[in-house]
Amino acid sequence: MIRTVYFDNNATTQVAPEVREAIAPFFCDLYGNPSSMHAFGGQIAASIAKAREQVAAFLNCEPDEVIFTSCATESDNTALRGTADWYGRDMKVVTTAVEHPAVLQPARRLKAQGYNVVEMPVDGMGQLDLDLLRSELKGTRNALVSVMWANNETGTVFPIREVAEIAKEYGAIMHTDAVQAAGKVPLDMKQVPVDMLSISGHKFHAPKGIGVLYVRRGTKFKPFMLGGHQENGRRAGTENVPYVVGIAKACEIAAANMESEAKQLTKMRDKLQSGILAACPNVRVNGDQAHRLPNTLNVSFEYIEGEAIAYRLSDEGICISTGSACASGSLDPSHVIRAMGVPFIAIHGSIRFSLSRYNTMAEVDYVLEKLPPIIKNLRNLSPFGPDRDPTTYQ
Ligand code: PLP
């Protein structure tokens, strides 16, 4: 059997055994509806209340500021759509060119509907120009700033506290997609003045299909999901009780271990990075290495294609990602790598390694053994190279 080395944890993560254990009773034993009047339902409502407190402790916020959703895509859509619906068409939306599609697509829908929407560019390291943010907000009456905490492809961490402080200075609503930051860096709502924040359970060892939208007290938005009175009238639909319990447990575990895990992840990621740079020529590291998630490494191998590398690694049991849109039938390079201005010779050859607490140094060694010969072989097959420049190829 081929071993599996799973280095694709920014795509999704393994459910923690403690999380699986915590949610199990809520399928067959504790299956009541939390909205029911009977005591059987009442104990479920109490479990949700406890979960809300656990998530609030993770975010250092109040329990009534936590709304459970079906995923971060729903949280992001609710933040953008819900704020736009409340403030109306004269609201300006300021976001970045490197957001996840769960923010970019609703932002573009708002633009098509006549809202003034700006996607701010990033520099070569994937960082923002905060003066540009100030100039976009200057003179606005209503504005929504939606800037991610950390980028899913490069791991680049934005200076979110400063971004939020600037947004507040100009009276704007501040939303952040903190999906990739959750469990890797502290998310403290008392320290960082964001009004809305999205996280997703399956990125930090809870199951797929559960998210949270944090909404600071007093923040105005129109709910996206209409129906029953659940979540205080802010998100209709019977609660996904097992997964609500699951994301709360995942928050508890993440908070308890974040510091030591971040150290271990950084050690493994840095060994992987230096091993790759030592063994393979013509490689560049994408993203801001001084401000980067501890678990993420995005590298571009010049003159070859990321998809070919990913397939070859998959044959060796190694799971990684490319940033391309190949799943949608095209081989367009990632919008994030493109926005950073990575040169043509490297843009198609970018791949992402993303680690978790369940990875080991032995797995890093295994990847460092398998990857260099694959790169060498693909380079031998490539029509391009340092002496065969594809931009001048006839
Ligand atoms: N935002 C970011 C930064 C992500 O990485 C993802 C998932 O890849 C999402 C949003 C969407 O999360 P979900 O799968 O919970 O809808």
Image (tube, helix red, strand yellow):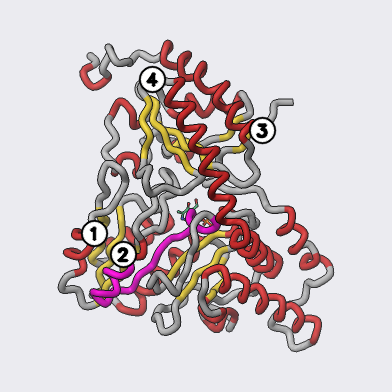
Q: Residue at position x 30%, y 43% from top?
A: 125
Indicate whether 35 appears above or below 269: below
As measured in the structure, the alpha-carbon distance from the residue carrying label 1 to the one carrying label 3 is: 42 Å
Name the image quarter holding the C terminus.
Answer: top left
**Residue 250 spot, x, y in % from top left:** 64, 60
Give the residue displayed 62% in from the left and 47% down from the top. Answer: 357
Q: Are marks 4 and 1 in contact (CB under 8 Å)?
A: no
Callout 2 secondary element: helix
How many C-alpha atoms fall within 10 Å of the one at disc 1: few (<14), some, or many (≥20)?
A: some
Q: Nearer the viewer, residue 156 or 109?
A: 156
Q: Where is residue 144 in the image (x, y as percent from the top left)?
A: 31, 70
Name the residue carrying label 3. 4
Please state which of the two labelled residues, at mark 4 or mark 3, is closer to the viewer: 4
Say left or right for 193 vs 247: left
- Report helix, strand or loop for mark 4: loop
Which numbered disc, 2 or 3, marks the residue closer to the eye? 2
Q: Mark 4 points at which residue?
A: 281
Label 2 sits on residue:
162
Residue segment shown in magenta: 164-183
Spot the residue most to the right. Answer: 29
Q: Where is residue 271 in the image (x, y as percent from the top left)?
A: 51, 33
Q: Say which mark, if any, is on residue 130.
A: 1
Proximity of marks 1 and 2: CB atoms separated by less than 8 Å = yes
